[in-house]
Every structure is written in C-alpha cells, then in structure tokens.
Amino acid sequence: MSRFTDFRAATPVSTLPSVLPPVDWASINAQAPAPVAVNYQGPDAQLPPAEVVVFTWTDHEWSAMDHVFLHGAAQGGSAPSSLVHKWLQYSRSAPGGSSPGGRLWGYYQLIDIQGPDGGKRRVLLMKSNAHLAHPPWLAGLEQMVAAVVSDAQPAHVYSIGTAGGATLSQCLGYVSVTDKGTLQLKVRDNTPSSLNGKTFPSPWFPNWNLMQKAQQLFLPLSKYATLASLQEVLDAAKRGKHEGAQELQPFSLNDLMNAALNPANLRAPQAVNFKGTPLLTTDTYYIAPGDMDYAALEMDDAAVGNAVLQAGKNFVFVRNISDTLVPAETPAHQAIPEKARGAWSSALYDAYGLFTSYNGALAAWALIAAS
C-alpha cells in the first residue's frame, strides 16, 4: 500500500487507543475540538456552512483526522466500539463509483475549534474520495472542490495528509506547511489540461503562533521506526507480492538508510514553515531522485489550490512526511532500481503513515486555532 493506492476507504473509521495515543490537550492548555451536530438530510443535501474546510485523502490520513479532531482527550474503556465515529456521506452532483467507498465525493463531519482568544472556528472536515491520480482525474477533483467550497463557503481551505520527502532534511514524521503548489501531469487523461507545469500561490498564510505548543504533542517516530522495526518492514516488503518486491531482494537496511530515516534523527519531529516554496503535485507515484527544491511531494494539492483560487478563497497545504527520500544508490555506489525504491517507499508509508498523519493533523489544528 502507498499514498497512491490507499484511497476511497469505506465509512465508518475507528481508531484504537492502543494504536494512537489520546491527545493531551490539557498539557498545552488547549481545548479539544468539539463535534457539532448536523441535521443530516442525506448524501445529496447541501453541506453546512463553515469558516474552514479541511480536506484529507487516504485511509491513514482519515483515521488520524478522526482521532485528533473528533475523539478529543483520553477516552474511558478500551472497547473499539466506543471509538467508532460514523462520518456523513456527501455526493451531491457526484458521479457513481464501484470502489468500496461508493459514490464520490466523500465523507464529512463538523467541529468547532477554540482559539487562544476564546473565539471558535467552525470547521468542516472532509475525507475526499476524488483524487488527481484516479478517475475521474483532474476534472473530478476540480468539480469536488468547487462543490464543497460552493456549499460551505469557507474563507480558508486546508489540504492535509501524507507526502514524500523532497530532501534529506525532511525526516519521517516531520510536517511541511506551504502556500504554493506546482502541478506536474503525466497521465493521459490529465495532460491536455492547460494547468500542467504551472505553480499556484495562495495570497494568505496562517498564523504560526501555536505551532510550538502543537509540536509538544507530536509523536517521535523514533518510537515506532526503530532499527528492529525497519528491518521487519524491509523483510515483509521483500516477501510481498507487490511491484518491486523482487528488485528489493539484494538490498539491506544499511543500503536503504539515510539521514531522513535514521531513528536517531526522528526523536523531535518538527513542523517546518515553507512559505513561498512550492510542493510538487504529481498524478503518478513519484520519488525524488535526490534533494529537490520542494516543500514535499504529493498527489492532489496544486490542483486543489487552483480550484480554491478560482472560487476566490485562500488555501494552505499541511503535509506530513510519511515516506522519506529513498537513496538512488547504496553506500557502496550500487544503483538501486526504481521499482525497489518504490517498494521501500510504499512499505514505509504502510508501516508509519498513520503515526506521521497524527503529527500532520495536530499541525493543522495549531494553524486553524491560531488564525
């Protein structure tokens, strides 16, 4: 599984306390987000209004969003049923689909986030089932964003989720925040678009004042991506039947290790302000060949940003590094094939993407609460 294949999950989602820790809001003197009751009229009804819309995409991202924004502080008991939260389907004017997630566009919930000034921000959380790299491609993604923004009429739109690292400094579990995205299209259904190759900037950037507090709650990926765990992930990837497993066979963990993945560098994850530096949005699963001048590598945001701008709104992208830059060669200068690099990247996402997404959701909370 990877950021490319982990999409259109079925509802509801559940998060177990044994997998993700409760959010200790009191430790940073903050209030947990409060769910807002919705008079739900079915999937074809108009969305409720909100000051902020937050899109997320994959199953890992959705589970982390559900946990951070809806479960609040520590919950009593350990029964999984106590942590299942049913999301509301939204598919007004959306095409049908044969995927497990059903019709596009996706699922939503409504919450209030309290800022340090005591004011509340009404926020629409949206798990999108439309993606740039899957049918109905760019056109469907643009239609989905336009529909959500037209209904909710937010001032600000966030796209949050997993991403590939673009540099060795972007360690597993770090979070990149940027106001700009560059679009690179290679899929035949997308390439006729005049947007290909363009960069889209937002005229707005959120307040950073609460980020230091949020970082106190970030999960150190050194707790999960230990050397022993990484070895287990590699062994499982080699045994797998997915593309690249065979090509991965000759390579050891030492061959694939670098500064971005070294557990010694994962003890204090950070949110990094990349204001003015674009992330790269692709419609194919792309791994950086080496250090690149991007905030992150992902598969939706630049197209989302353009659609938001067309609606006259502002956007920001909050991307957690779920799969780090993979070496192109071993320390002995043996080339690592692209399929092997892709298999390792996918294995890292599968093993650690839920934990990195927890950090990303907390970073998004900090920006919303402070702005």
Image (spheres, helix red, strand yellow):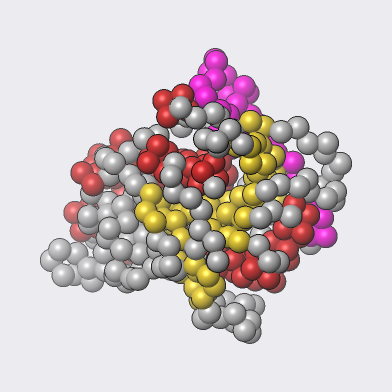
State whether residue 67 is above or below residue 209.
above
Count of picture labels: 0
Residue at coordinates 53% horizontally, 70% vertically from top-left? 201
Asked whether, in this view, residue 317 is left or right of residue 176, the answer is right
Task: Report the span colored magenta.
Answer: 66-94
In front of the other: 49 or 142 = 49
Residue 343 in view of the camera:
no
| Among the 4 quarters of the image, the one containing residue 165 | bottom left
**Name of the residue lying farthest toward the left:** 332
Residue 70 part of the magenta-drawn span:
yes
| Among the 4 quarters of the image, the one containing residue 141 | bottom right
Coordinates of residue 50 in the picture (x, y in percent): 71, 47
Coordinates of residue 265 in the picture (x, y in percent): 23, 47
Coordinates of residue 137 in the picture (x, y in percent): 65, 69
Residue 279 part of the magenta-drawn span:
no
Residue 303 in view of the camera:
yes
In front of the other: 48 or 66 = 48
Residue at coordinates 82% horizontally, 39% vertically from top-left? 40
In front of the other: 201 or 342 = 201
Residue at coordinates 51% horizontally, 81% vertically from top-left? 197
| Among the 4 quarters of the image, the one containing residue 302 | bottom right
**Name of the residue lying farthest toward the top:** 77
In front of the other: 17 or 113 = 113
Asked whether, in this view, residue 130 is left or right of residue 284, the answer is right
